[in-house]
Each structure stands twice: as structure tokens, then as C-alpha cells.
Image (tube, helix red, strand yellow):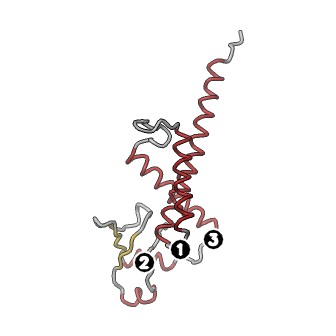
Amino acid sequence: MWFVYMFNLYNFDTMKKNKSNYQWTTTTTNDDCGCEENSAGIEIINNEEFGKLVEHEYPRSTVEVIDSVTLEVSNLLKKKNKDYGDTANNPPQIFSKLTAKEGILARIDDKLSRIKKIGFDNPIDSEDTLKDLIGYLILLKVQIEKEKDVIRKRIVDNKPKIK
């Protein structure tokens, strides 16, 4: 399944007529798509792969878009978790002494403030901010679940043993 997000839209008919490769920035793609990514983060899609993209039915169904968006945000969260460590849910507290939940809520406030300030007029900036906000909301839910797990473990560990 294709998950390609284009910021530079191109006339598909012209592309098909020219039968040439075209480049655009993507955020998420299927790993086995046969595409190459150059050092600038620009993905080069060959004619065969472009044909598959053009043949996909548009507009996509709501379920397809939900799958696409959730995969994109999930991949972003996993990449950031790998790059930065689990600092959102296990903050190092070097300067800030906020708990994990308080830190995530502060980041959510920052993203909401940015949306309030810039709105959704600039698609690239607002889309990145929206993805970040969705990511932080997921991290908040993850933190709440992790806190529940701690409580569950305490209950299980302190449960009297029946003889």
C-alpha cells in the first residue's frame, strides 16, 4: 500500500506523457516500493512506481486516509523516540523538574499556541505542527497507560496470597 505525501503537486498527465522521473519530498513510504532517497531527502520515483501512484483511486476513502495518517504519525513518533530516546515519557529532568505528564502537557500547550498564532494558512508549517500535536496527544495517552501499569503492578505485587 502506498503512503506518499506530496508537498509539490505535479500535473500527472504531463508526467505520464513525458515518461520521465520526477522528484518530490515525502514523509512516509512503503519500504519495498523500489524508490531511492537522495541526501536532500528527495525521493526519486521511477516510471513504474509513478504509474502505480497515478492508478490509485482518488479521492481515498476516509478509512484509507485514517490508516495513512496514523501510520505517518506512528512512524514519526518511533523515529523521534529512536533519535532522542524515550525523553517524553522518561524525562531526564536535567533542567526541568516536570513530570513526564506535565512535560507532555507543556508541549501540547506550545503546539496549540502555535496553531492559534499561525492558523492553518501555511500548509507545510501547520501540517508539521498538527502532526506534532497529534504525536504529543498520543504520547499523553501512552503516559497515562504507563501510569496505570504502575498502579496495576503495585496491586498485583501487594495482593495477598491465598493458601
The residue indicated by pointer 2 is 8
Secondary structure beneath label 3: loop
The amino acid type of the residue labelled 1 equals Asp
Q: CA distance from mark 1 to mark 3?
A: 25 Å
Q: Residue at x 43, y 46 (%)?
A: 81
Which x, y percent locates residue 49? 41, 74
The secondary element bearing badge 2 is classed as loop
- In the displayed structure, 78 sits above or below 116; it is above
Which of the two discs, 2 and 1, labels the residue nearer the N terminus? 2
- Image coordinates of residue 71 in percent, x first then y, are 52, 58
Which of the marked residues, 3 or 2, is nearer the chain's N terminus? Answer: 2
From mark 2 to mark 1, how far is it between C-alphas?
16 Å
Query: In what element is the residue under mark 1?
Result: loop
Which numbered circle lies on residue 61? 3
Judge depth for marks 2 and 1 and give the one in front. 1
Dot label at residue 121: 1
Q: Quadrant of residue 13?
A: bottom left
The kind of residue on which mark 3 rests is Ser
Task: Identify the residue at horizontal 48%, vertical 51% (top origin).
Answer: 77
Residue 145 image-quadrant placement: top right
Q: Position of residue 143 (x, y in %)?
A: 57, 40
The answer to whether the residue labelled 2 contacts the one labelled 1, judged by CB atoms less than 8 Å apart, is no
Mark drawn on residue 110: none
Instruction: Identify the image quadrant of residue 147.
Output: top right
- Choose mark 3 or mark 2, whichever is in front: 2
What type is the residue that disc 2 sits on? Asn
